[in-house]
Amino acid sequence: MNTKLMLRRFLPLSAVALLIGVLVVRPGIGLLSARAAGSSAMKDSSAAEDSTAEDSTASRGKLELLRVPPSDDYYPCTDCHEPGDPVNRTPRKLTEEHEDIVLDHGGGRLWCLDCHSAENRDFLHTAGGKPIPFSRAHELCGQCHFRRYKDWQNNVHGKRIGHWNGDKKVYVCFKCHNQHSPHFKPLTPKPRPLRPDEIR
Amino acid sequence: MNNNRDHTPKKKRNDPQWISRRDFLKGAAVAAGAAAVAGCGVNDEFFDTYFRRHYREMSKEEIDRMITALESRYEREYDRDFTIDTTPALQGVLFGYALDIARCIGCRRCVYACVDENNQSRDPQIQWIQVYEMDKGKGIDFDHATPYYEADKVPREGKFYMPVACQHCENPPCTKVCPVGATWKEKDGIVVIDYDWCIGCRYCMAACPYGARHFNWRTPKVPSNEINPHTHYLGNRPRYKGVVEKCTFCVQRVRKGRYPACVEICPVGARKFGNLLDPDSEVRHVLATKRIYVLKKELNTQPKFFYYWGI
Amino acid sequence: MFSAAYFKNFVRGSLYIITRGSGLYFGWLTLLIVVFAQGAIAYAGQLHTGLVVTHMRDPVSWGLYIGTFAFLVGIAAAAVMLVIPAYVYEWKPIKEVVIFGESLAIAALIACILFVTVDIGRPERVWHLIPLVGTLHFPSSLLAWDMLVLTFYWLLNIVVVTHLLVRQYNGKEYLHRFIAPLVITSIPAAIGIHTVTAFLFNGLGGRPYWNSAILAPRFIASALCSGPAILLVLFQVLRKLTSFHIRDAAIHKIAELMAYAMGVNLFFMFAELFKELYTNSEHVVHLEYLFGYGQFPDSPIRFYAWGSTLFAVIEFFLFIVPKTRRNPITMNLGAVLIFVSVFFEKGVSLVVPGFTPDVLGQVYKYAPSLTEFRVSAAVLALAAIVYTFMVRVELAIIFDKFTVETYRKA
């Protein structure tokens, strides 16, 4: 084997191979590490965010309840039901008034005065007799549905709109669940997607 | 061996004024090329959007120039004022998503809210979210599921519903296979696509185990009166024919602190979104207190999309 | 080693050769040009409207283009595999056999790159794939690997073929010390390109039909048993029409080696089928779609799958039995059968069942559109034109002793 001839032939070839390796593999790895570290442009702008980083990432913020009655006298029950009026505590189906309200809550185990305070109809009441204003009716729901209530308080039950890291608006229970007939009403679904062979 | 490599006669070669045939042809080619480039209407906008580097390597000035060019192009096309945001990932944030499949009723309002917010093509139809209807008896079984269910009312008796979109995996198979690095995972965990870098090879679509990626088989059409002009470069700006797109966790919204569109539209509040690194977030509460399910866990893609049962 | 003058002579001589020929030659070229032209028009339509003119959709996002690409990588790899037996069996006309195989690889690789180009959605952004200029995502993406190894292998073959022809044309012997290492390198390179192409499909966890360890070995085995088929037929044609000479024994040896490769291929196929059918997991649904039973009795690809398997088995027996191997009718029948069989296997049976049913259980029955057929035909026609030119030049220079002297006298 003529070593000089070999060198003349293969040195350029190996130099080319080395060059390709350095030029191709290094940028590829460079791209990978850029992916890990982030590009300089991105670094600069996110550095500016540092000062507000803590606030911007935490999930705090105000929770605004929507559809709460605007005032405690929004439902003027005591206009008809004056405190002190005699009360018929027999569970029954109402026929003279409020017959439009269908009570389908609790499978027949509940009736009106289980939630509405007999003494003062402007209030609801817990099982222990504590009065609850209509503006905090969700506390009454939470009395029985305590797991849901805890989830709702932790933003895990029910719809939220707003900011994941700031102020949120949430509906109170009876926006979605009618308090007398809480079973969720089925909705009409939006149109189905097109099948692939229907895409032209 | 032929010594006379250059066939120009000796006396002409030594004359400084003389232009060889070779030089003349070279010069003519360059001139023709320049004339062609100048003549075919190639302008600054083209250079700022076509002849550029990878997004993650561009300087702020280059990005700004490109954004300006894109904004004016979109404004011409849709006759609306476009803003293309380039907000980077917030520090200390890793986005996670939780979906309560005990509550989802399959109404598909999330699908269409997403379409509206993210400027998905109406014709041909592209929908980033697909809602699968399954039998309660069979459980989560995609071999016996269908996204094409039609009904007067949902939920249908004996069925439950599972919406599927990009899972924003921590170990995404799609970003591994892209041959040009047009898709990558951002620092806040969102897997994004640069629509101006994607070559449309669809390898990422073959790699995704969740069918989350969609291709623009035609030029996407969004009516001008329905277009959402508040966009992010890596998110909901209008796409092109021949590139891949997918759910971006509404990057244009979430980097400004807002919820994604699907979270806000869900009528039963089945969708939860937040920062996985914040122990007080909704998503972390779900992970701590509910039974969680992750699609195709055995593939080790580590999705940041968690299905759970709220009841 | 490389002389500009020799190369210029060679170019002039080659142009001289390919612009002259019989009516058959020009008829063949005209046919290829017509096929290419109609496909170019179809591709222009595809560019204008978008890939919607194919029948690929989101669930089946790769189709005829990528399937044929995989098949042609196999052809490119296998053509060079003849080099091994040429050395092992110490055939006299080694360089003659090698050169036809390597030029087939060159033409096949041109078609491969073109198939990828017609398949992608933004072909004007192909430069993103070029290292340094673009951002080739190497080593993470197997497509990036494929671009590099295919280009390397292609250039390797071009260098070898050009060197052989240029030297011979100018009346010199080829430099053995230069060529031999390159030819030896082309053997692992050939295995390499097809392994990388197999890994392209193999590494996807979400596609259980492809995610089998035996996929790469199956690729190599089916490439080895089908690639030489083209050369088998070509050698016989050239032997009849030109001054090309090759002994019958050499042709029979090629056929015999193909038979052994097919034996291995059938064994691998059997191993794959056993694993799927015995385990009988949910993944067997892809085989149901492939062969048209179970949930998919009317699968549109079942004829391709059964045809492919049947042809492979028939070819195996035709080639393994010496009598039928030597009979020119049965041998050529076998060559055609194996070519069609592996084309169905890689072009259809590989790609389509991988996507059907899709990752979330949905079924979209893909069949190529007219545009896909037209564009594929155009790419194949272009590769055929390139190969025709190369074969004519090789015939003239190596077998008709066409040299620069002969050219100067003409």
Image (tube, coloured by chain):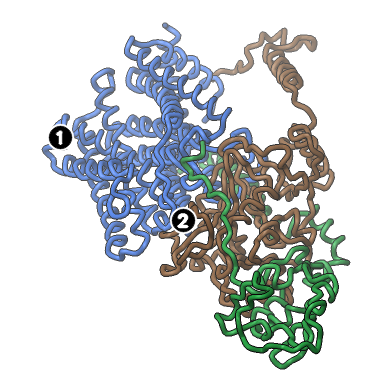
In terms of secondary structure, where does tag 1 sit? helix
Residue that carries the numbered disc 2 in the rendered image? B146
Which residue is at a point 20% across and 36% down the rendered structure image? C252
Q: Residue at x 19, y 42 (%)?
A: C314
User: Callout 1: residue from which chain?
Assistant: C
Instruction: Give the chain letter at badge 2.
Output: B
Residue A195 location in percent, x, y? Answer: 48, 45
Q: Which residue is situated farthest in the left direction here?
A: C323
B302 lies left or right of C211: right
Residue reaching furthest to the front: A96
Q: Is residue B162 left or right of residue C405?
A: right
**Colour in which chain B is drawn:** brown
Which residue was labeled with disc 1?
C326
Estimate how packed mark 1 is, as few (under 14), some (14 to 19) or many (20 or more) residues with alpha carbons within 10 Å. Answer: many
Q: Toward which corner of the image does residue A92 lie, by quadrant?
A: bottom right
Image position, residue B26 (x, y; %): 70, 18
